[in-house]
Amino acid sequence: MQDCLFCKIIAGEIPSNKVYEDDLCYAFYDIDPQAPTHFLVIPKQHIQSVAAVDETNSAIVAHCFEVIAKVTKELGLDSFRVVSNIGEQAGQSVFHLHFHVLAGRDMTWPPG
Ligand code: AMP
Ligand code: ZN
């Protein structure tokens, strides 16, 4: 999608520090890490947020979670947090579905 930062990252038009890639998903380190390990897993298809997941694209979202399980295992992470912000009030700043994967420090609950 034109003017979407993450679509441009997937297309290679904006550089990123890649963690993993396949036909459906792309994963890369967050530019402003909030934990010692902080990367984002995104579908290559432009989906606005979790609120736009439906029967036409949910298999891609399920695949993103397979990728999270695989990559965290490969990185030796046995405890981590997965976060997706939906809408501005929840802190979404890029409107292309992404799952934050955070690890390497104690996490608080409830999140802020
Ligand atoms: P959110 O605020 O939940 O929409 O998450 C967007 C995330 O994208 C933030 O954690 C940003 O730090 C991250 N981000 C923004 N631009 C880039 C970039 N060029 N490369 C990597 N991460 C980015
Ligand atoms: Zn996009």
Image: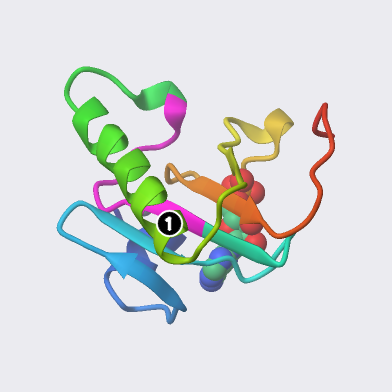
Q: Is residue 10 left or right of residue 83?
A: left
* Residue occupying image coordinates x 33% and y 50%: 67
* Residue occupying image coordinates x 45% and y 34%: 49
Q: Compared with residue 17, is residue 111 higher up or lower down, i.e. above or below? A: above
Q: Residue furthest top?
A: 55
| Figure quadrant of residue 105 | bottom right
Is residue 43 visible to us here?
Answer: yes
Mark 1 crowd level (few <14, some 14–19, many ≥20, 10 Å Cα): few
Split into quadrants, the picture shows ligand 1 in the one at bottom right
Q: Amino acid at mark 1?
A: Lys
Is residue 93 visible to us here?
Answer: no
Residue assigned mark 1: 73
Percent coordinates x, y for residue 102 in the rendering: 63, 53
* Residue occupying image coordinates x 58% and y 66%: 30
Question: Which span of residues is magenta-colored?
Answer: 40-50
| Figure quadrant of residue 61 | top left
* Residue occupying image coordinates x 41% and y 49%: 68
33 or 73: which is nearer to us? 73
